[in-house]
Amino acid sequence: MALEERVEPVAAPPSAGAHGAGHPSPKEYVRIGVVLFVLTALEITASYTHVSGSVLIPTLFVLAIVKFALVVLWFMHLKFDDRRFARFFVMGLAGASILYLIVLITFKVFL
């Protein structure tokens, strides 16, 4: 048996302009970038206003979670990958959130 007979042909890689099924287009990435920019502007605006910490911190906390979710789902492609990867990120987010809340409660921020 000759070596040429056992070698399987290699499929050509997809073209640079091709997108996988369901993956976002560059236009969608720009839209998500604009949304992230607006959320960041809201965070900065909220931090410079003179509101109490009991309102400011939960507001910033929610905005941070929304931004985290957008970045993870779209820019890290978790929306299009296996669900197990998403579970790892959700567990990390839950752990970080719980730790953050414990620190805030320890410093009596909500009183």
Image: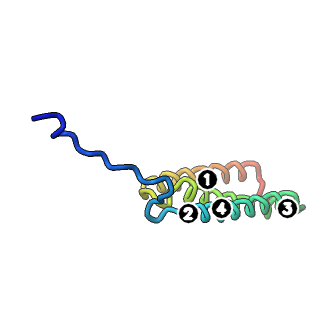
Q: Which residue is depicted at the point 44% across and 57% down?
A: 81
Decide: few, some or many residues near mark 2? Use Cα within 10 Å; few <14, some 14-19, many ≥20: few
- The residue to which callout 3 is attached is 52
In this image, 53 relative to 11: left or right? right
Q: Position of residue 50 (x, y in %)?
A: 90, 61
Looking at the image, is mark 2 or mark 3 earlier in the sequence? 2
- Amino acid type for the residue under numbered disc 2: Ser
Identify the residue at the far right of this view.
Answer: 50
Q: Position of residue 37 (x, y in %)?
A: 73, 60
- Amino acid type for the residue under numbered disc 3: Ser
Looking at the image, is mark 3 or mark 1 earlier in the sequence? 3
Q: Which residue is depicted at the point 68% across and 57% down?
A: 64
- The residue to which callout 2 is attached is 25
Looking at the image, is mark 1 or mark 2 earlier in the sequence? 2
Looking at the image, is mark 4 or mark 1 earlier in the sequence? 4
- The residue to which callout 1 is attached is 98
Decide: few, some or many residues near mark 1? Use Cα within 10 Å; few <14, some 14-19, many ≥20: few
Judge whether 97 appears above or below 42 on screen: above
Q: Position of residue 70 (x, y in %)?
A: 61, 60
SS assignment at label 4: helix
For the residue pair 21 and 106, the one nearer the viewer reads as 21
- Amino acid type for the residue under numbered disc 4: Val
- Quarter of the figure that contains the N terminus: top left
